[in-house]
Image (cartoon, grey):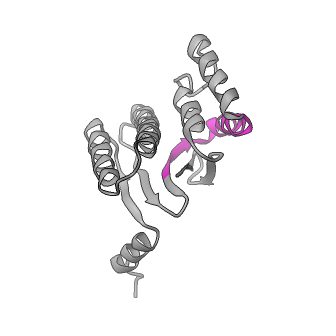
Amino acid sequence: MSEQFNIFDFYSDMEKNNVLLSFKGAITDDLISAIIELIENKLELKNESSRIKKKVFNILVECLQNLYHHNAEFNQQHGCDMSVVVMIAKNREGYSIVTGNLINDVKIESFKSKLKEINSLDKEELKQLYKTVLTEGKFSAAGGAGLGLIDIGRKSSEPLEYGFIPFNENYSFFSLNVKINQ
């Protein structure tokens, strides 16, 4: 007998973890707009402070744009969209925005190095790095200048949590967890 997916267990886990949104699939401009609108409405219904709403909104936009750009690169190389994962949850401390996508293994070390650098800097140093990259454009080997990731680091409440899990011989699954404390 084959193992069957239990939607009730999935639902129960999402309820237990207070998941506001969970999505898996290809990311598009329209989807980004819909997710942003949905989360804005949910934060409004929760009567969150404008400071929290702004932080969640800004970080969410950067995370979604990063997924979109990596998907576009994947599509260009493989002729198909990559499936990504986005989840937003509320906990006692605040909010978590969790994303996941495939990344080419040849980029992992460079990416890890950038994430470690971002996590090693305080908010003022991140602000300075952001300004430097904005003017000089040197930080990312992945096409962009890496400003989005630096900005996420600046606006997050805690160091960025990340991981890489081997997916196949060329790709790994990259996960990013960004925390916004109240």
Predominant secondary structure, magenta span = helix
Marker count (numbered): 0
Which residue sits at x=44%, y=40%?
67
Which residue sits at x=51%, y=31%?
148
Outermost residue toward the right in this view: 120
Which residue sits at x=63%, y=50%?
161
Image location (x, y in percent) of residue 24:
37, 55
Image location (x, y in percent) of residue 170:
58, 45
- Drawn side of residue 62 relative to residue 27, left or right: right
Q: Quarter-wise, where is residue 117 in the image?
A: top right
- Magenta-drawn stretch contains 111: yes
Q: Which residues are magenta?
A: 97-121
Image location (x, y in percent) of residue 144:
52, 24
- Magenta-drawn stretch contains 151: no
Which residue sits at x=44%, y=32%?
73
Q: As displayed, is residue 149 above or below residue 43?
A: above
Image location (x, y in percent) of residue 1:
40, 88
Q: Quarter-wise, where is residue 88 in the image?
A: bottom left
Between 149 and 7, the residue placed more toward the observer is: 149
Q: As displayed, is residue 18 above or below residue 3?
A: above
- Drawn side of residue 6 relative to residue 115, left or right: left
Outermost residue toward the top in this view: 135
Q: Quarter-wise, where is residue 33 in the image?
A: top left
Between 20 and 22, the residue placed more toward the observer is: 20
- Drawn side of residue 67 relative to residue 135, left or right: left
Q: As displayed, is residue 18 above or below residue 166?
A: below
